[in-house]
């Protein structure tokens, strides 16, 4: 009998592993189980569907039929795994369409279970007007609301990147009142507050009412209750983060770690024999803090799943870890971050200098040049880059990738100043803003002349 791989989860963390395994093992039987209706979809595109930039159907990168016909994967949608028995080596599956329950045996099991959105236990939470923004079902409902055009007041709870992208979507839809509420001192808690303040300023310039330092107390029909007063809302969208969806694995005896995320080794193997995991359900190793972290990003999910799939297929691959790189956009303001913030660097025990510079995205004299602020942290004594944040206009955010590359390579600020980066007036000043920041960090590390 052919060896059977069972994959739980029909998105990046599951299906990128399944397709990699198939490339290496034509003989393997692969059964993939997804509780929802869609497979290999881009949740990242949801805000842009709601905002009207992208068509809903374009979010599905590979349909169940394509998985079957192109990769010979037995893809079963609306089939939810209810339990895993590691000793008996089978999973218990609920077929929601057929209304039946059955078992599938496995030789190897791969977990791409994703994350679950945090839903605070607050009065009125089950109110029909509180929407999540996680699944394509959520996207369809939000799109429906947005397209009806009758929304006068939208309140977004959570000022992380997803909250900001959803706020942008409703601004674009012409909603007259968009409010973002967050209990943190500034928007975007993944940035330092001084950089977050630049983002909240940009939000206000776009007409968004920013209520940071405001805690939600509950929900009522058409109202969000906060410690700073009640806010009327036709629609409340909740985007306050996610936790790993690991209960199924933990119940089966698979070891979990930080925030309950599934523990994996560099080959994406879990503590259980023949069981791998990838994506939002599992841990990552942070290459700068040298600690395990939970990072819920599509970039990481795809890479981890590729590694898992190669290993399942008999190859050898490792995922070394993350540096925490992310970008987002709020109307015309772009944001990028990588590595450690000041708070994270301090918590990890580093001493550092902070270089913060203002520059332009193109040569200062070139038409269309825009503002950009770059902040860089470098470790005292070693001079090693620890983290960077960027806020600016068009052309700003993707510069964070240079910083992420330097971080991954363990470069010092001084080494960065010598990087042979490109220049022509339409693209950057002769000293690119990331190099200006590196130069300033080097000066600070050298101390007074
Ligand atoms: C609005 C939004 C915007 C985002 N933007 C970005 C971005 O710009 N950049 C970026 O890098 N990342 C972004 N992300 C994060 C990115 O989408 C996730 O990191 C990525 O989807 C993780 O893939 P995954 O396969 O691990 O998890 P998921 O995509 O959550 O997939 C897990 C799948 O498992 C299924 N499942 C769970 N339990 C079971 C079960 N018991 N049985 C069967 N099936 C099950 C779920 O239904 C789901 O389809 C965004 C996320 C959201 C919600």
Image (cartoon, helix red, strand yellow):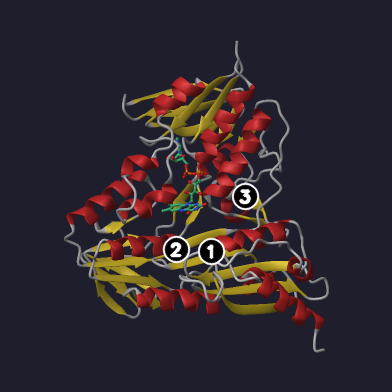
Q: Secondary structure at mark 1?
A: helix
Quadrant of the rendering where the C terminus is positioned: bottom right
Q: Which residue is mark 1?
A: 397
Residue 95 position within the rendered picture, expressed as x and y whole percent measured from the top left: 37, 27
Residue 161 position within the rendered picture, expressed as x and y whole percent measured from the top left: 46, 62
Q: Residue at x 62, y 47 (%)?
A: 256
Mark carried by residue 283: 3
Whether tag 2 and tag 1 are in contact, CB under 8 A, the answer is: yes
From mark 3 to mark 2, how far is it between C-alphas? 26 Å
Q: Is residue 352 visible?
A: no
Nearer-the-camera pick, 312 or 149: 149
Q: Which residue is mark 2?
A: 329
Q: Residue at x 32, y 44 (%)?
A: 56
Q: Please identify, in this view, whether the residue under mark 3 or under mark 2 is nearer the observer.
A: 2
Nearer-the-camera pick, 212 or 250: 212
Specify the quadrant of the image occupied by residue 436.
Answer: bottom right
Mark carried by residue 211: none
Q: Residues within 10 Å of mark 2 (few under 14, many from 20)?
A: many
Specify the quadrant of the image occupied by residue 444.
Answer: bottom right
* Residue furthest to the bottom: 448
Q: On screen, 178 above or below 118?
A: below
For this view, does 322 lie left or right of residue 97?
A: right
Q: Residue at x 38, y 37 (%)?
A: 36
For this view, does 38 lie left or right of residue 114?
A: left
Q: Secondary structure at mark 2?
A: strand
Q: On screen, 21 above or below 132?
A: above
């Amino acid at each position: 009998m052919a060896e059977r791989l069972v994959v739980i989860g029909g998105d990046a963390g599951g299906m990128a592993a399944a397709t990699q395994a198939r490339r290496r093992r034509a003989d393997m039987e692969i059964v993939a189980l997804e509780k929802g209706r869609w497979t290999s979809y881009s949740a990242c595109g949801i805000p842009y569907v709601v905002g009207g930039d992208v068509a809903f159907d374009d979010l599905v990168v590979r349909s169940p039929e394509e998985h079957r016909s192109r990769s010979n994967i037995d893809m079963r949608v609306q089939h939810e795994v209810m339990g895993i028995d590691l000793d008996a080596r089978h999973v218990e599956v609920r077929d929601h369409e057929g209304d039946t329950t059955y078992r599938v045996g496995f030789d190897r099991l791969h977990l791409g279970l994703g994350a679950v959105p945090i839903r605070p236990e607050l009065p009125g939470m089950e109110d029909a007007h509180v929407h999540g923004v996680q699944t394509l079902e959520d996207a369809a409902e939000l799109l429906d609301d947005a397209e009806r055009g009758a929304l006068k007041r939208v309140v977004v709870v959570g000022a992380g990147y997803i909250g900001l992208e959803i706020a942008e979507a409703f601004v674009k839809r012409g909603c007259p009142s968009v409010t973002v509420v967050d209990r943190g001192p500034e928007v975007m808690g993944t940035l330092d507050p001084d950089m977050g303040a630049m983002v909240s300023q940009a939000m206000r310039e776009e007409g968004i009412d920013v209520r940071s330092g405001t805690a939600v107390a509950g929900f009522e029909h058409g109202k969000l209750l906060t410690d700073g007063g009640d806010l009327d809302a036709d629609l409340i969208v909740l985007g306050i983060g996610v936790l790993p969806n690991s209960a199924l694995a933990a119940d089966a005896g698979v070891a979990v770690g930080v925030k309950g995320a599934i523990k994996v080794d560099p080959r994406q193997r879990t503590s259980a024999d023949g069981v791998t995991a990838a994506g939002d359900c599992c841990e990552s190793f942070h290459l700068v803090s040298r600690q395990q972290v939970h990072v819920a990003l599509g970039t990481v999910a795809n890479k981890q799943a590729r590694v898992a799939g190669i290993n399942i297929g008999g190859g050898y691959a490792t995922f070394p870890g993350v540096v925490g790189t992310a970008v987002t956009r709020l109307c015309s303001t772009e944001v990028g971050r990588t590595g450690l913030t000041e708070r994270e660097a301090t918590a990890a025990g580093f001493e550092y200098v902070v270089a913060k510079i203002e520059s332009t995205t193109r040569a200062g004299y070139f038409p269309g040049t825009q503002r950009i602020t770059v902040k860089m942290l470098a470790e005292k004594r070693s001079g090693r880059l620890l983290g960077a944040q960027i806020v600016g206009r068009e052309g700003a955010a993707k510069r964070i990738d240079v910083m992420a590359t330097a971080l991954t390579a363990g470069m010092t600020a001084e080494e960065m100043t010598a990087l042979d980066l490109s220049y022509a007036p339409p693209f950057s000043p002769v000293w690119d803003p990331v190099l200006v920041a590196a130069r300033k960090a080097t000066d600070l590390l050298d101390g007074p002349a």
